[in-house]
Each structure stands twice: as C-alpha cells, then as structure tokens.
Image (cartoon, rainbow, N blue to C red):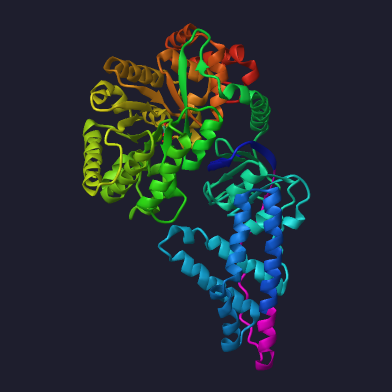
C-alpha cells in the first residue's frame, strides 16, 4: 500500500481498479514525397483539418449539453486555432517546399506553435500548450489512423490515471465506467479538473509520480476532498474509505439544512468555521459547505502548479478571485510557504540535507526578497476589494516577525506613493507552528493582530517526527499531551493579550479533536471545506461544558495512546452515525 497527496479538484471518494493512460507522443518519422505527389499531400492535410473541425464541432455541441460551458469552451478554442490561417497555412507551404508528408508537416507545424506558446511571456498562452498537442494528435489521427490511446479497452469501472489528460482523452471515455481521475500534473483549472467537475466525479491532480508507481488493475482510492490517493490499499483502509463514502452520502443529504445553521453548541456557544484553500476558486466551496470565510489560503500552490514564478498580476487575480467569491467574509492569505515538502529541492543550487529545518517558508522569503515583495504587493492590491488578512508562516522568533512586517510596511509605502488602492489597516497575523513561537506566544501577541495555530507543523517540530515520512507516521499525533499543552498555552496567552486565535491544522477537521479544541478555548477553526458540515453537526450535538470536560480529562493523561483511546471512545459515544475513519472516528 502506498499513499500519495495531491491537489483535490473535484470532491467525493472513488474506489476502483486503475487504468493507466500513457500519454507518450510518438514522433512521425520524416517521409520524403515525390514531386508529382506533393499536391495530393497538401489536399490530404486540408481534408484532415476539415475532418478534425467536424469532430470538434460535434464535441463542442456535446460538451455544451452534457458537460459545462467551461468544457465546451475548450473545444471552441480548438476550432478557432484550427481555422486560423497563421496556424495552418504554413503546413501546405512546408509540404511543397520541403517535400515532406502531410503528417510530418502537421507535426512540425504544431511543434513550432507549441514552442511559440511556451515562450510567450503571457501565462495564458503557456497554459494552452497542451491544447496544441491535443490538436496535433487529432489531425495526425485523421491522416494515419488511430495510435490507440487504450481507452477503448476499458471494460469495467475504472479510475483513470495519467501524466495529464487532454480534452480529447477526457471526452472519449465511456462515462458510465469512469469513477475518478488522478494525474501527475495539473491544477485547479487543468483540463482534468474542469472535466471531472463537469462530470461530477472525484479527481485529484498534481500527484507527482503516481502514474509511474501504479500499474493497470491495481486498486486505487482517490479522495477528491483531501487530495489523498492510495495505491493498493489494505482491506482496513478500503473499509475506512467505504465508511467515509457512506458517511459523505448521509451528511450530504442533511447538508442543505445544515449549511445555513450556525455552529452553535446546545447551550449557545458559537464557533466560527472557516475553510482552508489552495486556489481562489475554491472559496466557492467554502461558502457552499457553510463556511464563513477563508482561514488559510495556501498561496504557495500558485508556484507548485506552474513552471516559473507567477507574476504580480497573476497573483493579484487569484487573490482577488477569493476575495470576490467570499462576498464580504474575510480571506486570510498566508504568504508563500515554499520549501521542504512544498517545493522541489531543484529550486536550490544545492539540495538541503534537512529541508524541514532548512530554508523553507518565511526563511525562503527572506532569501528572495523581491519574490516576497511581489507577493505582498499582489496581496495588498487584493485587499482593496474586500476584507483580507495577511499571515506569515513558520515564524520562530520575534526578529523574523519584525522583519516580515517591515517589508510589508515598505511595500505599503510604495503602493501609497504610486497611488495604488489597498487596505492600509489590514490585519497582520502569524502562524504558530514552531514550538519556539508557541512557548513565546505572549511576546508575539504584543506584535500581531491574530494567531493561527498550525498543528501540522507544530506536531512535527514538537515531536521530532517528519510529517511526510511514513516510517514514523505512527509517532505523529496531534493528541500528544505535549502538543495539547502547547495549544493551551498559546490560547491562554492570546486571551490574556486580547489577540484572536484560530487553528488551521488538519486536526481541527476531526470531530472529537475539534470539541477538545473548543474545550481548550478556541472559537475559530479553519478546515478542509468539505469537513465544515461534519463539524457543524458535531458542535450542535454538545454543550460547551461537555467540551471543557473533555479537554480537562484529556489533559490528565501523560501518553498519546491514552489520549487517543479516550477520544476514540468519546467519538463512538457521541457520534456513532458520523464515524469517518479518522483518528477520532
Ligand atoms: C500547519 O502547519 O498546520 C498548516 C496549516 O500549514 P501547512 O499544512 O500548509 O504547513
Ligand atoms: Mg505549516
């Protein structure tokens, strides 16, 4: 069994055998053509383009009625390209001048167009390179017949695994058999994501290396909510995800009623539930599930899903998208948290020996001040459109916080000088995810507008357990008494100084853990959007006194095992119907 983490782009859980789609492009060899046959080759090329246009028109119509307008727009774009004389005219010229076959000329022409797109400074063109390859394959198929993609072999239900999916591949599937998609590359707006959402099936993209690991016929689980992909799961894991599948269906039924209800305990304590997102467009999901804003926007995903850095304008558009979709609810933008698990070490001239303790996150920002300031400008510009908060990750010393704030102030001054709109009073906060920050929380509290506790990292640094290393996964637990004590200390320090504190690590999305956190004093939790209705339901089931009792009892144990056993028992008693297979049930 092997577990991977990618970017969830279409919700739901799928369990099925996998079907690996190979996307290797086989080059057409050069074939010289006799002078007398040249015009025939030119005609063949023209006919192949016409036939492709016919196919595309039909696909466009089909996508409009059966998929979505976004999916249809892809085929409309393909038609426009294929009708553009500047794209297709050089094909005939090449056949005549270089005396080559139609298929070779088509291949060479599209390669040149792809290269041109790739080198454009405008990112919109760079994202269209895959469309060019897709068109090339379509026209060549008209000329030399199908080089089998393999989808025709699909016999039963399957999860499609591919380096990336082209629109042609996605639209050629027998939809009654496809249970989900997982791809090595891609982001929220990749073709795979658009098609998966249009088809209403789960998908995870950006699962680096997955198509090389899984083999055809292997059982696969994909979780389109958390981004988890499991190859050859053991029977227990299958059962766990099946439980969640049932659970998701049951809760979705009650979702419509829960969405507009507050997350209030039976005795009247209200908890604010926010969503964690990786892309601006996901904000829609947060509101859909009943969240009241974005508690953590992991902006580094903008870097992880493209070659090269996003420009200031691209970042601004992405952040503004979140602000617009949030419709007046606050959006907390965390500055990019690159490094360690969230970037390839290829960015560094010399890979680090110990990247989690290396130049990651805010340290990486300080190493690259221009990159950091570009992001700060983009965030500030977005703050002109609605409530935005800014948050610095991995702060471990007051000096780091001051340095980050200083840079923010410099950028604000620049914007003011340039007359560019922004919110000069936006709240500035920090993640508490390094033990030194947790221990010194009262000192930090004097200098920030808010704290957000990041247990994902706090656990790994407190317990010296790499959060990505499956060999020590059983040692990684937010239920460890040392972690609970640190959270308590931070909440206490924040309260004393009147600083709002929230928690955005994965543990906040687990049912009994969330009650424990409420018992400790937290009143704002930020979680994967699809967890929001679960938490609402859990919170609405209990009294605050119950949460406080839970926290008090958990605080009496000195071992993680005792805490976990206690929480599990509580979960079974409190929410037998909501069991979700997580550590707490
Ligand atoms: C965390 O560390 O808890 C957190 C929310 O940030 P990330 O998982 O992105 O490191
Ligand atoms: Mg973190």
Which quarter of the figure is the N terminus placed in? Answer: top right
Magenta stretch: includes residue 29: yes
Q: Percent from the top left, x then y, of residue 229?
A: 59, 40
The stretch of residues the image draws in magenta is 17-44
Asked whether residue 31 is in view, the answer is yes
Horizontal arrangement in the rendering, residue 21 relative to residue 411 (left or right): right
Which quarter of the figure is the C terminus placed in? Answer: top right
Q: Percent from the top left, x then y, of residue 27?
A: 61, 72
Q: For this rendering, which residue is in front, 556 or 446?
A: 446
What is the count of numbered marks? 0
Q: Quadrant of residue 16?
A: top right
Q: Quadrant of residue 257?
A: top right
Q: Percent from the top left, x then y, of residue 14?
A: 67, 38
Q: For this rendering, which residue is in front, 559 or 348?
A: 348
Q: Is residue 458 above or below residue 336?
A: above
User: Residue at 40% across / 51% down in the picture?
Assistant: 314
Asked whether residue 5 is in view, the answer is no
Q: Is residue 524 above or below residue 212?
A: above
């Amino acid at each position: 069994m092997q577990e991977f983490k990618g970017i969830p782009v279409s919700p739901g859980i799928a369990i099925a055998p996998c079907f690996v789609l190979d996307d290797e492009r086989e080059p057409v060899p050069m074939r010289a053509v006799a002078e007398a046959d040249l015009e025939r080759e030119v005609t063949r090329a023209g006919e192949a383009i016409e036939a492709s246009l016919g196919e595309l028109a039909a696909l466009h119509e089909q996508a409009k009625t059966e998929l979505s307008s976004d999916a249809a727009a892809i085929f409309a774009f393909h038609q426009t390209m294929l009708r553009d004389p500047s794209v297709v005219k050089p094909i005939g010229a090449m056949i005549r001048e270089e005396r080559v076959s139609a298929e070779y000329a088509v291949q060479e022409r599209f390669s040149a167009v792809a290269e041109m797109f790739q080198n454009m400074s405008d990112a919109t063109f760079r994202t269209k390179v895959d469309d060019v390859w897709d068109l090339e394959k379509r026209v060549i198929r008209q000329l030399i017949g199908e080089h089998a993609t393999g989808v025709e072999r699909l016999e039963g239900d399957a999860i499609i695994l591919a380096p990336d999916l082209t629109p042609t591949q996605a639209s050629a599937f027998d939809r009654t058999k496809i249970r989900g998609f997982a791809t090595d590359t891609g982001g929220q707006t990749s073709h795979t994501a658009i098609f998966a959402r249009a088809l209403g099936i789960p998908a995870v993209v950006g699962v680096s290396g997955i198509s090389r690991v899984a083999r055809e016929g292997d059982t696969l689980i994909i979780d389109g909510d958390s981004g988890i992909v499991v190859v050859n799961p053991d029977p227990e894991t299958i059962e766990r995800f099946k439980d969640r599948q049932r659970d998701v269906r049951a809760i979705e039924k009650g979702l419509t009623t829960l969405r507009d209800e507050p997350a209030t305990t039976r005795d009247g304590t209200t908890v604010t539930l926010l969503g964690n997102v990786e892309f601006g467009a996901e904000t829609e999901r947060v509101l859909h599930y009943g969240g009241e804003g974005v508690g953590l926007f992991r902006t580094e995903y903008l870097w992880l899903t493209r070659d090269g850095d996003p420009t200031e304008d691209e970042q601004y558009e992405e952040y503004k998208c979140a602000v617009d979709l949030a419709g007046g609810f606050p959006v907390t933008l965390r500055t990019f948290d690159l490094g360690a698990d969230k970037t390839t070490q290829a960015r560094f001239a010399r890979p680090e020996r110990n990247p989690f303790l290396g130049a990651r996150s805010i340290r990486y920002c300080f190493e690259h001040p221009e990159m950091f300031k570009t992001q700060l400008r983009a965030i500030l510009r977005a703050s002109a459109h609605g409530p935005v908060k800014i948050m610095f990750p991995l702060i471990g010393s007051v000096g780091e916080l001051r340095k980050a704030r200083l840079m923010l102030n410099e950028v604000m001054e620049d914007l003011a000088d340039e007359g560019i709109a922004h919110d000069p009073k936006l709240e500035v906060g920090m993640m508490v995810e390094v033990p030194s920050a947790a221990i010194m929380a009262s000192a930090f509290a004097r200098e920030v507008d808010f704290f957000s506790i990041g247990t994902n990292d706090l656990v790994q640094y407190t317990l010296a357990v790499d959060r990505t290393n499956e060999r020590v996964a059983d040692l990684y637990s937010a239920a460890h008494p040392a972690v609970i004590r640190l959270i308590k200390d931070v909440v206490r320090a924040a309260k004393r100084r009147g600083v709002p504190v929230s928690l955005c690590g994965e543990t906040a999305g687990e049912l009994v853990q969330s009650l424990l956190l409420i018992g400790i004093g937290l009143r704002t939790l930020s979680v994967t959007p699809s967890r929001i209705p679960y938490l609402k339901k859990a919170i609405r089931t209990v009294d605050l006194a119950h949460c406080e009792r839970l926290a008090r009892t958990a605080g009496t144990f000195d071992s993680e095992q005792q805490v976990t056993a206690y929480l599990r028992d509580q979960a079974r008693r409190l929410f037998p119907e909501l069991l979700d297979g997580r550590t707490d049930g």
